[in-house]
Image (cartoon, helix red, strand yellow):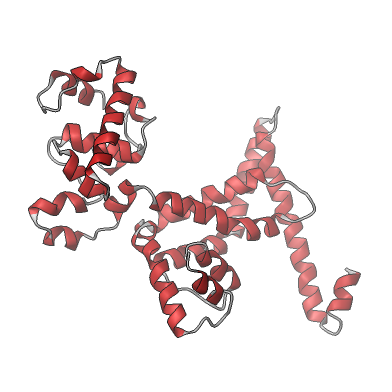
Amino acid sequence: MIVLRIVYEGEGDYIYELYQHSDEWKEIDDLIFTYQAQFKPGATELDKIDADKAGLELLERFHPLFKKYVILLKSGQINFKNTEQRAFVRLFIPEFHLQKALGRKNPGHEAAEAITAKFNFLIEGYGHQDEDEIYDDLRVIFFTLAKRYKNVGRSFCCYVYNLFKYEVARHIQKYQQNPANFHYKVAPLEDCKKAEMDDYSAIEDSVYEDEQGLPDHTWIHGDTCSEMFQSFTDEERLIFSKYYLQDWNDGQIAKLLGMHINTANQRRKAITHKLCAILGFDPKDIKRHRKSGKKAIMSSEI
């Protein structure tokens, strides 16, 4: 504390505030260690009960952090005066000159517009989710850091400040790279209504499921699929559904996923071989015809 008195001499109120923060950081560290106790060998039921209470207290204390990210990801309104926000946005901006502009509180009107336009791509993808879904993602990321944290001379608050933005960015980038997420969550209902019938398949609504019981987005995302399909990626489940259950051809699938038709063909074949290995079928016996006996067997396992 002597160092603080020297550096901030004459700013008594500010020093007192730092002391107060120091006390709060210690309280939060204690909550973190209480939360972590449930994962240690020999943890008792009482440890788990205390860990649940500590977890709820941590969520309440860090709610302002989650709220700040939710507002940014839902609205796309960047506060360029906020150092943490600029550092987070920078993770999604590949252009060096724009990254350099983000190093300043006032990047300039032209740079700010370019940065906002690029960042808003997230709003059309990940940010299109319900607010509660984003909150849930942020809480999972937070508790992952809480479980991983080790006391090595820095508080958990500093640990979160330094790492949380990177973990959130990594999660969003993974989400954005998934074609199933992008196509099911981005297009507004009005676009679906305006689309021509030939192109309708490329804009599917997030609640789509026809009268025949075709898999909806929860099956594509792996939430409601059977154990047999848990090892598949979202893209693989999407391709399987389109090809075998909705009678799409490789060209239509390629158009939907933005890839070359040969790539779609190879991925579809790989999915077929993967499924055959699970079921013990010979891939040569799998026919594309919708009334194929083998296809009916596979679809019944969904």
User: From the image, which quarter does the C terminus lie in?
Assistant: top left
Is residue 83 positioned above or below 9 on the image?
above
With 280 as the anchor, is 25 left or right in this view? right
**Residue at 80% from the left image edge and 74% from the top image edge:** 16
Image position of 8 with respect to 287: above or below: below
Residue 98 position, x and y percent, is 49, 73
Q: Residue at x 28, y 34 (%)?
A: 266
The reply, left or right, for residue 157 in relation to residue 185 is right
Residue drawn 38% across the image and 30% down it: 230
Q: Is residue 226 above or below residue 37?
A: above
Viewer-proximal residue among 30 and 165: 165
The residue shown at (24%, 40%) is 262
Q: Quadrant of residue 65?
A: bottom right
Q: Quadrant of the N terminus?
A: bottom right
Q: Is residue 73 visible?
A: yes
Of 193 and 42, which appears nearest the observer? 193
